[in-house]
Amino acid sequence: TERERHRKLPFTVNLAMAAAAAEQQQFYLLLGNLLSPDNVIRKQAEETYENIPGQSKITFLLQAIRNTTAAEEARQMAAVLLRRLLSSAFDEVYPTLPSDVQTAIKSELLMIIQMETQSSMRKKICDIAAELARNLIDEDGNNQWPEGLKFLFDSVSSQNVGLREAALHIFWNFPGIFGNQQQHYLDVIKRMLVQCMQDQEHPSIRTLSARATAAFILANEHNVALFKHFADLLPGFLQAVNDSCYQNDDSVLKSLVEIADTVPKYLRPHLEATLQLSLKLCGDTSLNNMQRQLALEVIVTLSETAAAMLRKHTNIVAQTIPQMLAMMVDLEEDEDWANADELEDDDFDSNAVAGESALDRMACGLGGKLVLPMIKEHIMQMLQNPDWKYRHAGLMALSAIGEGCHQQMEGILNEIVNFVLLFLQDPHPRVRYAACNAVGQMATDFAPGFQKKFHEKVIAALLQTMEDQGNQRVQAHAAAALINFTEDCTKLVLEQVVTSIASVADTAEEKFVPYYDLFMPSLKHIVENAVQKELRLLRGKTIECISLIGLAVGKEKFMQDASDVMQLLLKTQTDFNDMEDDDPQISYMISAWARMCKILGKEFQQYLPVVMGPLMKTASIKPEVALLDTQDMENMSDDDGWEFVNLGDQQSFGIKTAGLEEKSTACQMLVCYAKELKEGFVEYTEQVVKLMVPLLKFYFHDDILHKTLAAAESMPLLLECARVRGPEYLTQMWHFMCDALIKAIGTEPDSDVLSEIMHSFAKCTEVMGDGCLNNEHFEELGGILKAKLEEHFKNQELRQVKRQDEDYDEQVEESLQDEDDNDVYILTKVSDILHSIFSSYKEKVLPWFEQLLPLIVNLICPHRPWPDRQWGLCIFDDIIEHCSPSSFKYAEYFLRPMLQYVCDNSPEVRQAAAYGLGVMAQYGGDNYRPFCTEALPLLVRVIQSADSKTKENVNATENCISAVGKIMKFKPDCVNVEEVLPHWLSWLPLHEDKEEAVQTFNYLCDLIESNHPIVLGPNNTNLPKIFSIIAEGEMHEAIKHDDPCAKRLANVVRQVQTSGGLWTECIAQLSPEQQAAIQELLNSA
């Protein structure tokens, strides 16, 4: 009946509710287990949690957050998990929910915020709301949660302090919440922040509004107009910094540091006030150390991010320096110091360490010109103070400023060194320690000059200090300083020996052979016998030393020991699997094998099966990376071995650095094997390519950047190795590389790595030749090169704007020049890629090139800087050389500039223009004939100018001489050859530009072999002059002996040799050096 039905219904609902309650109860238990200190329980709970479907997770988590009777830890955990879920899996979970559930979640969140009474819990719920809002801004910037915005407006004006805090917290967490309506609401946002910042009754509101203001400015870091609009919030913000510090809250001060780091220009209108406040807080000893260090950090950060702006406030800099020095004096007396281990972890947070680091950074940021005169007197006074702490701080300060004041200190280094060495005899051990530190640091900062000038007194003083019995820490630091000193010394000596071997082999052998026999037996003895664990580093370094000496003296001398050394290395290699991952020998071994490969050449191939296993294992270490939001990072930042890069928008990229250096070294060694062994390395090309290609992706760490460099460098070398397997294998390998290389050119942000990848792509294209790129490749590459060129012009404009800035000074100009050099280097690589494409595809690639044509034409406009014009001309040179006769259709763009730039002020531009005129004569076809005639007097004018052979002009001049030769050879009817030839001969030989030297010598051989009367002269009277030209060319190594041209020149000489009297006459007119050069040519070619 109806009545019965009514009676049963609640029973069914009750059952469902009971089941839901039971599930929810289970979930509370799970939350408890997720917080368990027991690893096993926690791991099990994590697995269970991961397996709950997304929608159920949201339901359970919201219920737990809403339930005020649940345990506080469980509610907080639920809030953190829900925020993480929305942060990491929003797209997988939220859009799949029914729209009514989505609406319920949004209204539920806002309701919970209003009901919540616990402040810390409310903040966590606000974090969830901010995360949801962040994900509900669509691609066009529309906010899909208008109720959230309304809540924000209502709450910020509420009488309820908790709600005002909530609104500010959400806005601080996600300042982009207004989406594309931000401009519309700008005045409202400003009014809201000003109003909250003036709330005298509630310090928490003032603090939160100041942090929210900072977050908003940081989120709009490129919006200069907004900075001006919000400039009048700065005094209130600075007041909040001050007030919060005295309430033991450094959050607003941290926000100020972020502003100084990211948007220093925002501080400009009130920079004096900002600096004065920072200085006041830094000097206030009633604040805790962290707050004082953060206040100092504001000034130090500005010295790095806005050096020009800060240099105008020299009074502040002058007051900051004593503050840093005072911090450095803040040292504890410690009876056990002399024999304690090196720096404890808590020492790194000390004022002394913070002051030293700040001084180092400020000196580098502002430059020695400003800093050294300000600090010199302070340091001198400290070093004369009877209190050891002041002497210690003075010496540490001297160590800290070396890098930044390098140029200014170099002139007075002798006095500094003499003074510092006195303190190695100081009565206090910690002052002696600081003196060791100063010597070691100077050895690094001023190498190699420091070692050359001061080796005698420094080594003697340090050896004496190493005998400081009873002060182990001083002894150890003296030893460390000596290593610093001698590392650079040894490296310098070896480098010099290696360099001299390369240029003058006998001199080097005479110098080094006595050392070799003296050292090698002892070094081999160490490798054989130093097998204990504590001697691993010594053994590794000895292995390195042996391989370096072998490389220095060369194969012939080293072969007497090569077999023994290889056996020692092989024995170490077979023990490789037993080595611990952090064994220092591993990286030394890897490098040593590569040097042995360089020494032995092809003979090394037999050892590859032994070497490649461990090498590939090390090179294949996968770096552990993670994308974390700021709150997750707080739990990890102390985790050993992680480094973080802030990506903005509350996110950071983390990478675990353990093993990366070894991986980087291993990748570089693989490059070395491919380079040295060529086809001998073919067995390994496939596995190395599979390892290297993924490394072209970008990560934020120096060691990974080195691997990316190695990966890029390896690509063309591996193709060369694989060539022996035939075209099909080669093409397959290239297909595996090509897409990754093009993608990397488009995405790599580091200019050094990018240039290497571009160079690699160009080399690969040259190896593979015509047909190696398909239409998709061309389309993608065209877009990327276009973007690079547009970026090049845009960057130049930005630099011009910076030159108009009110803070512009000569140090700003230096950094702008560095940026410019980087940009130009990338431009050279764009030119390399186009060269490789033109030389491979010839004129059929011209229709593709036309998308870039306006940009290349822009490069050669008269108002552009000389490197632009140089490289623009180089690109047109390639078009003439490889794409003629079709190149003439672009003549209207480049011919006039090319002729005009032959006489340009810049030698680099002259060289590019002259080369272009030469290839125009050689390859250009008939359309170019009248322009060859027009070019000749311009080229002659450059050659005959008074300073044409100076060091900076000689390359351009030689290209002009070569171009004249090419016009006579390839377009003889365009000029009067008989009139020009005598002049041309008088300009020979060329010896700086080796390629053009070969061209001119080949033409000279053509003329001699055809018995040209003007060249040989009546009765061969010009032959002694020709001999002199050939001898000079040989003396300057203008032509390699394996070049066919060298054979032709030798044959010319041999022909004259057979006609007795003429030979005697020619030789008699040569100097002894020239005669020896002719003999060398005859012996070698």
Image (cartoon, rainbow, N blue to C red):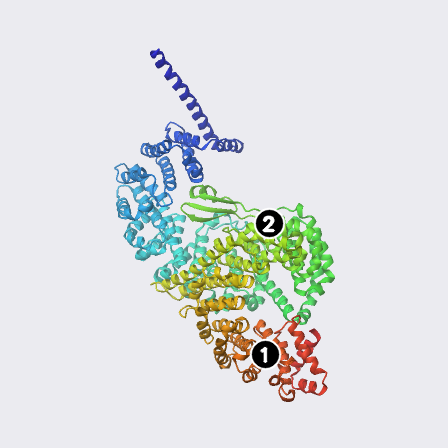
Residue type, mark 1 in image: Pro
Q: Residue 325 location, x and y as percent?
A: 42, 57
Query: Could you tell me which residue is drawn at 70 percent across and 61 percent down?
Result: 520
* Quadrant in which the N terminus is drawn: top left
Residue 386 can be seen, yes or no: no
> Could you tell me which secondary element the residue under label 2 belongs to?
helix
Q: Secondary structure at mark 1?
A: loop
Q: Nearer the viewer, residue 696 or 162?
A: 696
1024, above or below 213, in the image: below
Which residue does the numbered mark 2 point to in the structure image? 690
Quarter of the picture containing the C terminus is bottom right
Q: Which residue is mark 1?
A: 989
Relative to 417, is 236 above or below?
A: above
Kind of residue indicated by mark 2? Lys
The part of the image, by quadrant, that contains residue 650 is top left
Circles 2 and 1: CB atoms closer than 8 Å? no
